[in-house]
Amino acid sequence: MITEKSNTTLTFEDFKTEVLNDYRIAVTSRECSLLGRKEVLTGKAKFGIFGDGKEVPQLAMAKAFKNGDFRSGYYRDQTFMMAIGELTSKQFFAGLYGHTDLEHDPMSAGRQMGGHFVTHSLNEDGSWKDLTKQKNSSSDISPTAGQMPRLLGLAQASKIYRNVNGITIKDKFSVDGNEVAWGTIGNASTSEGLFFETINAAGVLQVPMVMSVWDDEYGISVHAKHQTTKENISEILKGYQRDEDSKGYEIFRVKGWDYAELVSTYERAGAIAREEHIPVLIHVNELTQPQGHSTSGSHERYKNAERLAWEKDFDCIRQMRLWMIAINIASPEELAELDFELKKEVLEAKKDAWNDFINPIIEDQKNLLDLLEQIAEASINHKDRIRKYISELSAIKAPLKKEILVYARKILRFIEVPNSKVLLSNWITNFIGETQGKFSSNLHSESAQNVFSVEKVLPEYAENAKPDLDGRMILRDNFDVLFSKYPETLIFGEDVGNIGDVNQGLEGMQEKYGELRVADVGIREATIIGQGIGMALRGLRPIAEIQYLDYLLYAIQIMSDDLATLQYRTVGKQKAPLIIRTRGHRLEGIWHSGSPMGMIINAIRGIHVLVPRDMTQAAGFYNTLLECDEPALVIECLNGYRLKEKTPLNFGEFKTPIGVVETLKEGADITLVSYGSTLRLVQQAAEELLVLGIDCEVIDIQSLLPFDVNKDIVKSVAKTNRLLVIDEDVPGGASAYILQQILEEQDAYKYLDSKPQTLAAKAHRPAYGTDGDYFSKPSAEDIFEKIYSMMNEVNPSKFPSLY
């Protein structure tokens, strides 16, 4: 394990000890890779992707990595994690087997493939640890270059902590902004847009980021000549090199097998980033990948004999061994003896990890078999069938939990003796109850700061208050209070700063709170989200603004794969309570008027989706979220910024509850469910229908995720016996989800006297102009006539057909 040193002067014996320790880690890691591949090929593990060939540069990176620093990396960084003391051989194999206990697999408790690493930022109660006193790794994800956007935010947090005064929570997260964010990526993945977007943004922001590119010339089977212009990422990025006249990057190129030069390079890179807040790119080339990309194939299929021979000669561990012998660190015999010892240690670790994984499952298998023997003995008509299943189950020497449960559930179908059926059904229920949580917990925060911990606080108004402020001014004045109340809160996005956002909801905020807290950024939605994720991982409370809802598509992959899964894939050991602010619905034209809510809510489970109908409600959501530790997307109504609203007296204090619906109008004939901008049309239609004797109940969903946690909509349907969901997403989009929640989760079908229906937009995007909106999305007349036709079916004499 690398430890902090105050004395940098080493004797030769100290130097020798340190190099030998590094060698031990490298060989241990390599043995884990080699044995790991065998475990997959023999069927004990399902899939393997390993860090062989990258061991030596990762040792060098670990030496420069200090307490408080963060890694955002590539799924081959096992040697680095071993070097900083956050991964043992036994834990490596526990992850490979998918052990569902964090004590055994602290990386994800079996939720991610091996090779995906994390350190724990949170205590058991969900509170923050002191991140300045530990070495930190943000939780890896598999999508190539997906680690890049959050890396930007991890680095920017240091800049914020160094330059923004008054952040009271700072002590657990930063020491004067001296922390570096270290990124790693494979050379082929530098072809991804997320890589270039992040590299550009880090150069603009000038943040302390060190980006390592592990270059072994291939992306799976595809050579660099098909991946990168000039086959050289540092060559094509050399225009980013800083000089006397312009800011930029410091760029280094170093051979991946040269231990001494790697250590020197990483020390220089770390010092530059840490002291000067300059981004650094380290292109580590001439690396190898001895076992190929993964256990799904062999690199002999696509590398020629010359390349394979070169890789054998320039394997980084072999070259390190030769160097150690040349400078008298150790003799060949001593290293051979050490290699043999390390192989034995890794083999024992593998065996221990396998036994820890399989023995509890075998115990479950034994308990079930004992129970099934009793059941078979008592069986009347199906004894032979049950005994056949017992024989098949007992023959499985290394069972999965799934296999045990499958047999139990199959046998349950053939039990005719009531007592036996009760025994087995109870066993199944208990087994599922004990096991399901190991795979399904922590999608959302389970701490005392989750969104349900905040009590509703109503806006307070002066007596006889009348609408007197534009909606955007409600937001502005509320943000003003929040920025003052929470010095760790900051907001950034396109046009957010100087002009106070495109709808003036942040007017004057940059001038008052500074360019770091209210910041303009470039047109780069994915890394706007990434900035927010990284800063939230380090204790700040960022609000990332995506200018329009349609633009969220540029960022949806990062939201879906990274932010939405963070609590889940770390089993609650990391959190990033990022607030994403955007605006949408009913603007004009194909590219500015989409409401792809069905896509969004199905892509980002793990993030709350809030759909306020006006700006007071939106402000209340921001007030609520800043008291919680969960991420959320807030979609403001684009056509509501200039509408007048009453002025609250308690800005920053009133709170809109999350997951709670609001009844805007009570009625007896039909329940209308909607949200956002469409609600105003629903309310208009409801008033017009009342003239004809149709009394509608109008319910504002307020939040799509979570949805109506108190199940209030079904109470309305029980009264009206009819249901219409109105939505401006495409048919079968969010309206289908809403209907499923009401009918299945709330069992509202029991109370319906008419077919439940939806009214959505057309399947195409809205055409340009007011007419385009009218003929593309539900209008007040569409809503009126839809409801009227439903009532015509109920009472055609009272409500004769309109057409």
Image (cartoon, rainbow, N blue to C red):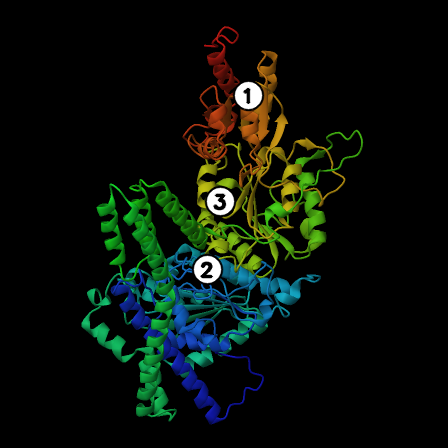
Dot placed on the residue nearer the N-terminal end, 3 or 1: 3
Contact (Cβ within 8 Å) of mark 3 with mark 1? no
Q: Which circle marks residue 442 in the picture?
A: none
Position of residue 393 relative to residue 257, above or below, is above
The span from disc 1 to disc 2 (Cα, nearest Å) is 52 Å
Residue 59 location (% of width, % of height):
43, 77
State the residue position of label 3: 552
Dot placed on the residue nearer the N-terminal end, 1 or 2: 2
Q: Farthest right residue?
A: 463
Kind of residue at badge 1: Thr
The span from disc 3 to disc 1 (Cα, nearest Å) is 37 Å
Position of residue 247 relative to residue 388, above or below, is below
- From the image, state whether disc 1 or disc 2 is nearer to you: 1
State the residue position of label 2: 148
Q: Is residue 706 left or right of residue 652?
A: left
Kind of residue at badge 3: Leu
Position of residue 77 relative to residue 366, above or below, is below
Element under label 2?
helix
Looking at the image, can residue 188 be seen? yes
- At x 61%, y 12%, the residue is 691
Element under label 3?
helix
Element under label 1?
helix
- From the image, state whether disc 3 or disc 1 is nearer to you: 1
The span from disc 2 to disc 3 (Cα, nearest Å) is 18 Å
- Dividing the picture into quadrants, the one containing residue 314 is bottom left
Residue 744 location (% of width, % of height):
45, 33
Q: Which circle marks residue 720 in the picture?
A: 1
Dot placed on the residue nearer the N-terminal end, 2 or 3: 2
Kind of residue at badge 2: Met
